Each structure stands twice: as C-alpha cells, then as structure tokens.
Image (spheres, rainbow, N blue to C red):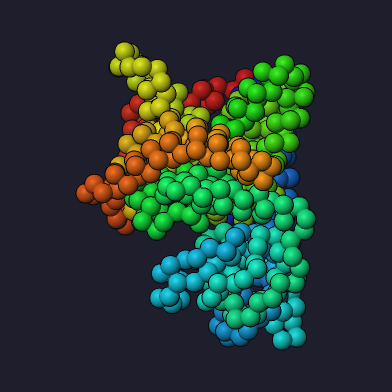
Amino acid sequence: MYLVFDLRLVYLVAIIWVNLIVVLNFNNYSIMWIFLVICFVSLLFKKDYFIEILLIIILLIGSSLFIFLRLKTLDQAVTQDLFLTKSSVKIVAITQSDVQERKNRNPYTDQSYWEVLAKSKSLSEEENTWNASLPIILTFSQEPSGLTYGASVEVVGQIAASYRDDKAFLVRVEEASIAQHPSYFYSEINRFRENFSQVAKSVNHSAAGLIPGLVSGDTRLQSDEFTEAMRKTGLTHLTAVSGGNIAILLAVFIWFFKALTLRRKSVFSFSLLLLIVFLFLVRFEPSAMRATVMGLIGIWSLTFGGPRTSFGALNFSIIFLLLIDPFLATNWGFMLSVAATAGLILLAPQIQKLWVAHLPKTPKFLILLITMTLSAQLVTYPLIGFMVGEISLISLAANALAMPTVAWVTVFGFLTLISATVSPPLSIVFIYLALPAAIWIEFVANSLAKLPFAQISFSSVTFFALITAVSAVVGYRHRNLIRISLLEERK
C-alpha cells in the first residue's frame, strides 16, 4: 500500500511542477485547463483511480490559485511596461539575505555592485499602487549601510528583468531607507550568525572562512580565488546548506537524545525544535527546507509509525513546499537538491549492487562513499550543465575526497555557531576542532582546480540532449538491473 502511495505522488509532483513552471514563465494558465480536462476524462474511464485523480485536481487548482493570487496585482504586462518606460518606482520590501558584493557580475554594467534578496510588499508608480508579495533582487551601486536580514526597506529605482528564474524582477536602487528594523527574533538570528562569522574571522587560517559557508551558507569570508576553485571542482554545493547538512545534524540529534534515554516523543519534540532553529539560522534555503520536511517525516514515522519510504517523503516534501512557495518551481538550488536526493534514493542502491557484484572485496565504507557521490553526480550533471553551460570533469573525484570530512565540519561548525553567542570561549574550541577538516576540503579544492581541463564549456542544450539520449539508451539496455521497485507492480 505504501509503495502505491509513493507512485501516486510522482504523478502529483510532475503535474504540479510543470504547471507552475508554465504559469511563472509564460503567465499562462492554459496547461492547467489541459490537465484538468485529462483528469476529468480519466475519471470517466478509470473508476478505481478516483481518489488519485481527485487529489490531482484539488492540488492542481490549489497551486494555480495560489500563484494567481500572488501575481494577479502585478502581471507580466505591468512589469513589461515598467521595463520599457524605465520610470522610477517605489517599492516596500522585506530583506531576505545579507548584503553580498558581486564583482563583475552586474548584468547591466561592467562594475561590481551589492545585492540583497527581498520580498516585495507593495510597488508604486505615479498614481498606481500594487500590493504584490513577490521575490525580487535589490541591487546597489554602493554598499548600503545598516541593511540586515529581516529589515523592512523602502527603495526608489528602476525595475529590470531578473537574471534568476525564481525572482520576479530586479531593482536598480537609486534611493533607499530603512522603514523598520528587524524584529527581536530576526535580530537574534542575525546576532548568532554575525558572532559565528567573527569567531571564524579570528582564526588565522583561510580555511576557517569555509566553516560558516558550509554550516550556514555564509560565504562572505571566502576569497574570490577559493570560491573559483570550489566552482571548478564542483564543490560549490557544500556552501549551499544542502540536505546533507540536515541529515548529518538530524542523525547527531537523534543519537544524542537516545543516549540520554529520552522517550521517542521527547526525541521527536527536541529534534523538531532544533531543526526549526537551524532552518531559521540558515534563512530558509530551498534545499534546507526540502531536507527539513523530509527529516520531520522520517522522525514522525519512527516515533508514531506510518510509511517509511524515503521516496515517498521526498515527493511529499516537494508538493508541500511548492504549494507554500510556488517560485521554488524555478529555483535551481531546489531543483538540484531534489535531483541529488532522488539519485541517492533510487540510483545509489542499484549502483551499490552492481559494484558489489563485480568488485566484492571493496571495503564497505569505500563502496558507500563512491555510490553516494556517483549517484548524486550523475543526476545533477545534466542540470548543472544546462544551467551554467559548463561542467567540472573532476567533480566526482573532488566530492569523493571531500565528503568524508563534511560531517565533521558540519557538527563542530554547528556547535561553534551556537556557542559563539552562548559561550564565546567554548566556540574557539569547537572551531579549532572543525578546522582540520576544513583545511582538507580547501586543499582538495585548490589542488584539483589547478589540473588542466578541470572545467569544460559547451552548448547547454546540446549537452542536455546528449545526456538524455545516453541515459535513455543505458536505462533501456540495463532495465532489468536498474528497475525501480516502486514501478514493478500495483497491488
């Protein structure tokens, strides 16, 4: 029964995701009506699928209605007119990131600029005002002072097309003022992160700057050279607060609470609290949200019983998050997180079986390391190539070398993050415990990035088509070996 439930969720995920991508990119709801017609026709011929089809209809209408309510006051026609007229607009927004300097990445000039992610509350142009809750990018020609995460800001500037698919538009800010400082809660979150950054900065080693990046996604202390080395070796995902961070911390939380002989419900409650705190500390990164939902489903199943399939938890988390924030449908970080997790769940066990069958004497820890790295890389390669038009030829080796130390940095880095505010002297101990593993990751990135042909460029469309064709041929030829058990039969 549980496997059938997983299979139903696959259809739901595909339909909702495709519908949201079309709506967000083309402002067109026609595909929703096509899906609805197909569903209603299916009801006439497949009575035994009544519950599944009815659920698809409800979620399809619900997700479309949600995005319609977000976009109805400021549709593409309005933003296009504002793009063309280049008139100044006034926007009230809430910041959702730290101020980040972007060097030589301004899509409109050759100069560096400062960038802040935000969510708009209202937009005014002459006598017209729109209430629009949309994810946007604020860009400044000079570094804004006093602008922190969670602040309400009023800006005046010109809007332009966003270079990110998951952001509605970009604002080239001419004037800015803080309307309201962050609430006490967000101020405390900012204080924890800033204290963590200061502790890392006090360590006289460049690798210390990697620790805040790996734990909380704060990459401000990383040098441009190291950031480039991470990109060339395919290790950038380590500083994106991936699901791996959540999984590592969750495992440590559960082990610690069980060591205290706490009851299952108490373990669930404390783990839930710590996961929520961590989610706020990393500022709701898409991959962290996906991993948190999956982690909570896993803890709930272990505590109270119920389905325990990871694939079902993944599908449920996708549907849940897309309904909460439809813009995640076009967020590359979310896509890569989902793809990597699906690879770990579906491909890793099959690769492990093949490896054991052909090389049975390989140590178990090495098999686990290789299969996990390979499965995630195989699935994300096409997406990365399509997204940036280049891939790292050494990312598999770099990840295999770096991954064994990630858990060490994550655990002691998280303890540093908490103790940096609660007990500063103790934080020095924890960060020096995390430092050796960070030094190793830095060494791997810097060393492998120097190799010739570490990164190659290509036509992203051609590469994506080639990967799809090769995957289809390999999948068909070895279908009996890699057949996914979820699709074997319906009972």
Quadrant of the image for the N terminus? top right
Q: How many marks?
A: 0
Most distant residue in the top direction: 361
Q: Is residue 334 left or right of residue 482?
A: right
Note whether residue 192 is visible: yes
Q: Nearer the viewer, residue 491 or 469?
A: 469
Quadrant of the image for the C terminus? top right
- For residue 59, above or below residue 89: above
Most distant residue in the left direction: 452
Q: Position of residue 483 (x, y in %)?
A: 44, 25
Q: Nearer the viewer, residue 218 or 434?
A: 434
Q: Nearer the viewer, residue 491 or 433?
A: 433
Q: Residue at x 47, y 43 (%)?
A: 238
- For residue 242, above or below residue 114: above
Q: Position of residue 413 (x, y in %)?
A: 55, 39
Q: Is residue 96 left or right of residue 382?
A: right
Q: Is residue 400 left or right of residue 44?
A: left
Note whether residue 377 is visible: no
* Residue 290 occupies quadrant: top right
- For residue 388, above or below residue 422: below
Q: Residue at x 40, y 76 (%)?
A: 110
Q: Residue at x 31, y 13 (%)?
A: 361
Q: Position of residue 167 (x, y in %)?
A: 58, 62
Q: Residue at x 37, y 28 (%)?
A: 370
Q: Position of residue 230 (x, y in %)?
A: 38, 49
